[in-house]
Amino acid sequence: MFIFNLNKNMEEKMQLKNIVLEAIGKILKGKGMENIQIEIERPKNSKFGDYSTNIAMKSAKILKKAPFKIAEEFKIELEKEECFKKVEIASPGFINFYFTDEIFEEILKEILNKKEDFGKINIGNQEKVMVEYVSANPTGHLHVGHGRGAVVGDVLSKVLSYVGYDVLKEYYLNDAGSQIDKLSKSVYLRYKELLGEKIEFISDGYKGEYIYEIAEGIKEKYNEEKNKKFLEVEEFFKEYSLNWCIDAIKSDLKKFGIEFDNWFSEKSLYSEKLVEKTVKELEEKKFIYTKDGAKWFETTKFGDDKDRVVIRANQSPTYYASDIAYHENKLMRGYKKLINVWGADHHGYVKRVESAIEALGYGKDTLDVILVQIVNLFKDGQPFVMSKRTGNFITMEDLISEIGRDASRIFFIMRSSDSQFDFDLDVAKKESSDNPAYYIQYAYARSSSILRKSKINLDKLEDYKLNLLIEPEEIGLIKKMDEFKEVLETISQNYEVHRLINYATELAALLHSYYNKHKVLIDNNEELMIARLSLIESIRIVLRNILNIVGVNVLEKM
């Protein structure tokens, strides 16, 4: 079901839902109901119309009439609209709409004309949006948990750009703090070990094989460090190890088809005294108090369960202090909407950051946080074994090696990100309808194959007799393609990127069903064949646009 407000700007008039809304809006105008929300839905059974609305029941109290009576009055006015073939009423007052054949022809023409621009509804009006995702500590390779958040953030960014937002994709580098100290000490000890010294490794150090790789690189290039104590070379080891890990992360992301517009350094918040400035600003706003030598931010004033320390008693800032400064910096750069994609283990942190943004004078709805649940990998019915290279987790690189980039990306967003996901690697390799990655890509390849076999160049749209497409399956496919805009609009509002995979799978299923039932390459009826080829080309365009947004390969042959 879709709920819309009549005052909403509806730019895409050819969108079926907007035709219905506009027709209803004309009737409601002047009745004191301009702000009423209209609920319209697409009936599962087409005999109940292309769309249906309960507006008669919703407006009964306002108009002080029985719903069925209101529906009858609406029907009289709605039947004057040329776009509707008929309007019917169903008890107790549902209004069912049936579009004319010409409307479906116009939808096909729009797809064939716009091609890669089909679905680009400008609802963003170039509003500046920042999507921050992954932002894993730069202490080693990315694991599969990061992979899910990476694809969710990346696809959401692409959708938002597609519908007209000015999107910046940002990675926040936690390159300051104890985790970097621990990394450099771990590498130093492995370095000493490679030099033949007996070491006692730190209990909370990083133990993966990649630590030896970093240490080996230092040993080969900078052997003069071997006689120096850790305190003498700590900064060198920090910088070298950090840069190695950042390069490793960038390499992992590139293999996954992800590139960021900006990498923001946490260290810059301190070097430019932004943390100090933000804390002072909160003090001036009377949201900071001192207790036991520490400075506390009164987040309870904004709904948090307890106040939070921003400056410890030893005068060192907490991670929370730098996070507040970072989010203020985002807003100072002109971004009106901030979207963070975090792991589910950060759920307790959401309210703290929201509190800070509100305290700094920004609206409650400025920040949206998407919490991504964990991924469990299975192979041969068993949990997938850990990576020896990292010691304690499976890397994104391991996953890509196992099933490929395309399947990895599609599988990561085939379920809602707020639900735990059991990722079956065997299914991801299957060439069957059980595998959405294969199923969607095969639908595109199949449509390409049909068009190649026809050897017909579809370049004269004005000559196509699209009115010959009258089969229920053909009308169903056209209505499903029109849905593409609705799906994109819905994702831009609720960030549920799995809807794109659900939609693509449904469209692919309709294509396969249609092709199995109706012959497209007809020998004795060229006009019908061209009309059906135009339908196939339209499906191909929509599928290609989806695959491009999801960031996977568009395969002409499989």
Image (spheres, rainbow, N blue to C red):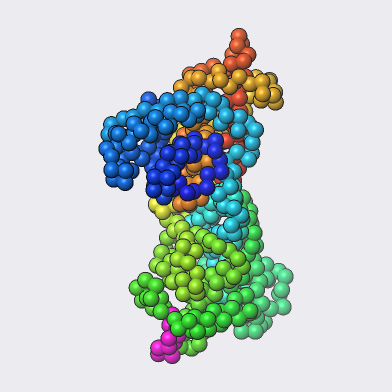
Residue 159 location, x and y as percent?
56, 48
Task: Answer above or below: position of 415 versus 361.
Answer: above
Going 42% across and 32% down the picture, which residue do you hit? 77
Q: Residue at x 65, y 33 (%)?
A: 113
Per the rendered image, the range of residues in magenta is 288-297
Q: Main secondary structure of the magenta part?
A: strand
On the picture, is 55 further left or further right than 492? Answer: left
Q: Position of residue 298 (x, y in %)?
A: 41, 79
Q: Where in the figure is residue 389, as x and y percent of width and height?
A: 55, 59
> Can residue 204 be seen here?
no
Q: 228 left or right of 373? A: right
Residue 122 drawn above or below residue 349: above
**295 drawn magenta:** yes
* Residue lying at 43% horizontally and 28% vertically, measured from the top left: 79
Q: Quadrant of the C terminus?
A: top right
Q: Nearer the viewer, residue 158 or 53?
A: 53
Residue 66 x, y percent position in the rendering? 27, 37
Q: Nearer the viewer, residue 435 or 187?
A: 435
Farthest-out residue, front: 30
Camera-side residue of 186 and 351: 351
**Residue at the image point whose x is 49% and y is 48% from the top:** 8
Q: Residue at the far top: name it.
A: 524
Q: Quadrant of residue 349?
A: bottom left
- Residue 20 visible, this orientation: yes
Query: The N terminus lies in which quarter of the figure?
Result: top left
